[in-house]
Amino acid sequence: GNTFLITTHEAPDGDAIGSSLGLYFALEEMGKTPYLFCKDEIPAQFLFLQGAKNFRRELPREAVDAIFGLDYGSIRRLGIDEYRNVFPQIPLITIDHHLRHIPEGTLEVIDSEASSTSELIYQFLLFCGLPLSRQAASALLTGIFTDSGGFRHVCTTPATLEAVSNLLLRGCSTSHIARKTFHYSPDLLPAFGKILCRIALDEQSGMASSWLSYKDI
């Protein structure tokens, strides 16, 4: 194919954005025409990524050769039902690290043990021998870094760290990504204060809980 729709879930996080951009740049390097779509706006903390402003909130008017659905878990989160109804012949290629119950795609690459969809995209590009530019590497590293909690979550495996090592060799910086993505706005401090004041401990289970209302927000 030559034209591709790359889409990810609503309320996109670092992995959704990073995996989409990684694939986007790889396809561009091949001389293809990729189209980035997300039904919601890209959060401000990820606009530092090159290509983040290329996401569109409108679907293309014409049929593409294939759709890549990334990191979405449930098909309804993509917001492409109407587009697929108009162009039912377009194959849907799913790449995801969320386990799902109902197959939705023509081709599915799902690995629930991967740290992130960005890690799967990295493995996909490596396996296919596709180009991996510095901007693609930075996007994929952002996805891996954020979805693994800065490599703190149990999903961080030797394969994850090997991928990170190779991405760093392309000139990326985890400290730069951490500064951009793991920060707290001073505007959130009153919310944290309310959360701390409302903490309740259940002696039987040992579980602590708190809450915020929509009014608080």
Image (tube, grey):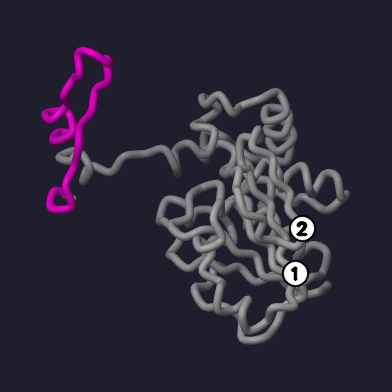
The residue that disc 1 covers is: 91
- Please tell me whether residue 153 is drawn above or below residue 33 in the rendered image: above
Residue at the spot 75% in from the left edge and 78% down from the top edge: 89
Residue 37 quadrant: bottom right
Residue at 67% across / 86% down in the picture? Answer: 62
At which x and y percent is residue 116? Answer: 61, 40
Report the residue at 59% width, 28% height from top: 155
In three-dimensional space, the C-alpha distance between marks 2 and 1, rounded to whole angstroms, equals 8 Å
Q: How many marks?
A: 2
In what quadrant of the picture does the N terminus appear? bottom right
The quadrant holding residue 55 is bottom right
30 on left or right of 63: right
Query: Which numbered disc, 2 or 1, marks the residue that appears first in the sequence?
Result: 1
Residue range of the region highlighted in magenta in the rendering = 192-216
Mark carried by residue 107: 2
Q: Is residue 159 above or below residue 86?
A: above
Q: Amino acid at mark 2?
A: Leu
Residue 3, quarter of picture: bottom right
Q: Is residue 123 left or right of residue 38?
A: right
Secondary structure at numbered mark 1: loop
Residue 141 appears at what percent x and percent y?
A: 62, 41
Between residue 203 and residue 217, name the one nearer to us. Answer: 203
Q: Is residue 199 magenta?
A: yes
Describe the element under mark 2 as helix, strand or loop: strand
User: Magenta stretch: residue 182 in it?
Assistant: no
Residue 151 point in image, percent of width and height:
55, 27
